Image (cartoon, rainbow, N blue to C red):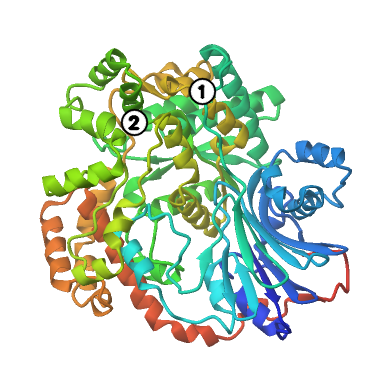
Amino acid sequence: MTAILGVVGYGGAPPLGDDIGRRMLGAMRRRGAARAGLLRQGPVVLAVARQGWELDPDFSGAVLAVEDGDCAVVADASLYYRDDLRRRLAAKGVHPAGPTPSHLILAAYRAWGEECAKHLEGDFAFVLWDARRRRLVCARDHVGQRPLFHATLGDAFVVASTIAGVRAHPRCGTELDLQAIAIDAAGLIFSGSAQTCHRGIAVVPAGHTMVCGPDGTTRITRWWDPEVRPARSAATFDDAADELRAAIERAVAERLHSSAVTTVWLSGGHDSTAVYGAGQRALARSDAGHRLRPVSVSYPPGDPGREDERIAAVARFWRGDVTWVNIDDIPMFDGVAERAARRDEPYGHLFEQWVRWLARGSRGCDARVVLNGHGGDFLFQSTPIYLADLLSTGRVLRLAREWRAMGVQQARLQHLFHWAVQPLIPQPVLRLAEHTRGRRFEGYFDRPVPAWFAPRFVREHDLAERARGGSPRWPSRDRSGYEMRWYLVEPFYPRVNGCTAEYALEEGVETRSPLYDTRVIRLAAARPWHERNSLGETKRLLRRAMRGILPDEAVAARTTKTGTLRGYFTRSMMDAAPLFRAAFREPLLAEVGIVDAERLRRAADVYFRHGGVSFLAEQLLSTFQAELWLRARLASEATKTSPIPEELASVAAMHDGAGAREWCA
């Protein structure tokens, strides 16, 4: 993986010294340290550090930076559909000077200016300096696997791949944002904020472009805005399924490693199996040989996560062998304090270790590229929110049929009110009803503030509003379509994607998500709601698209949910009870006023007596992670003045355009 950095000085600010640039790169050395360098052009310094295996042409490539006249760029990127991009560039009269992502990004900027990101397909973050216009342009892809953070530090603007990289600038303060820490500690994951836990440092949102102008002012614009609207002249269901299968095949083919094995993290669900089947079909048609190998987690019989038999059947269909990772070998809490100390923020993915062990399974296959099924739930499945659309348009008979088809266990009046009626009630009316009722109506993704949070802190930092502010605010029509768009632009999911990608990259593999391909998204977004969820069946279009390239049992409708991590989560949590009790004995979160220590300890005792998966369990884990992070953060402020790491002490430098136009590893 790659660390990138841009620093611009304004108003006569002294230039950034090479030693400071190296120190900032050093703070990001987990993202790259094998090859690194600094490029200086007037008031700007661009820097990059890359892992050795990412010098391969299938990744960011051996050219670390590209300088072309008045423009220079550093990128953390893997781009797809490169031939298509070159044709569109040629139509604009622009011809890239080389084949790497950095060359193509700079060429795209020549062709389309600040709107260049919307013309790129891939997983990318880049920082580009336009000397003629004296502006710094930064952008991230819509999936969010490559991070960027920024801060204005007096007369300097800084953007870097990690918060630690920004914090290593000598003008960056050390003040923490207690509200942001509390949001993570409470598990209020759908807060929708660009703030971080470090005062003054914010994230460049996924699917956005940030421009820092000549006077140091910044503006952020969204370039990724998926249009979710069923086409009036839509193809038939079968024709759309054929079109979708072809699109997924190409999306997978674009993301395969060109010369080595590629692995798929294969579950027994519909999404990753679709990626595997489409990939195998694409390889068979290209006569490229067998280069796609499944890696899966094996669960013991009776575990709710077990899908071993279905996974094995999918692999056999294509004469493949599964590389198994045993769930009992994955220690959820091993090294948890050390991992918390390495993070820039309190939030940690619930199943970080699960991701890391899968990545190690892929490395055991000698793979550097991993495909996953991320995005499938958002594109090809929906919640029962379509019931509100049916009610609002008077299709009561269809609503009754759909509700009955959901099954006896779900078909309760409370369930019907929650999905069909509540989304239609205006917010002021709903608030008045809540006041009369004496308790809240839970929203779509509302998360309650944990009972152990200090009431005064909750009031002063508006945590109750933040807790309910993450849910969609439904439009007056097409709520099902709005739901898909919300999934695609809600900031939490890029955050999860970024964490997953980071864990995998640290283990030596790069994750890629074919179902997030913009061509696949456009096809899914143009289809009607009942192809996602209707009469008790979900993912109807995706399952039809995979018919014939997966075994029948893999494309059949599911009556029960399998492949869940409930059993693993509960076992791991119960085994970790001593860790939680030790962390909550004298919590620092209480010292800074966020939690009530006694209430926290009582809540932990209640959970560890009963176990299970619940909001209580997830919130306790969020608070536990935040406590470990805060302890490590307050104990490590001295690292702000740490020496330059040895591996980056002799970083190559280019000053004021001296040297090659392409800066190679």
Residue 467: x and y, percent?
30, 55
Residue 251: x and y, percent?
62, 33
- Name the image quarter holding the C terminus: bottom right
Q: Residues within 10 Å of mark 2 (few under 14, many from 20)?
A: many
Mark 1 vs 2: CB contact within 8 A: no
Could you tell me how many numbered marks the image carries?
2
Residue 482 placement: quadrant: top left
Q: Which residue is mark 1?
A: 527
116 displayed left or right of 582? right
Q: Is residue 319 above or below residue 489?
A: above
Disc 2 secondary structure class: loop
| Kind of residue indicated by mark 1 | Arg
Task: Give the residue at x 21% y 31%.
Answer: 417
Residue 259 placement: quadrant: top right
Task: Give the residue at x 32% y 18%.
Answer: 394
| Kind of residue indicated by mark 2 | Ile
Residue closer to the observer: 312 or 32: 32
Q: Is residue 123 above or below residue 245?
A: below
Residue closer to the observer: 638 or 134: 134
Visible residue check, residue 536: yes
Visible residue check, residue 439: no
Looking at the image, is mark 1 or mark 2 earlier in the sequence? Answer: 2
Residue 653: x and y, percent?
78, 76
Task: Give the residue at x 19% y 24%.
Answer: 411
Residue 592: x and y, percent?
28, 78
Question: In the image, which disc is placed on residue 50?
Answer: none
Q: Residues within 10 Å of mark 1 (few under 14, many from 20)?
A: many
112 displayed left or right of 127? right
Disc 1 secondary structure class: loop
- Name the image quarter holding the N terminus: bottom right
> Distance between the Cα atoms at labels 1 and 2?
16 Å
Q: Which residue is mark 2?
A: 385
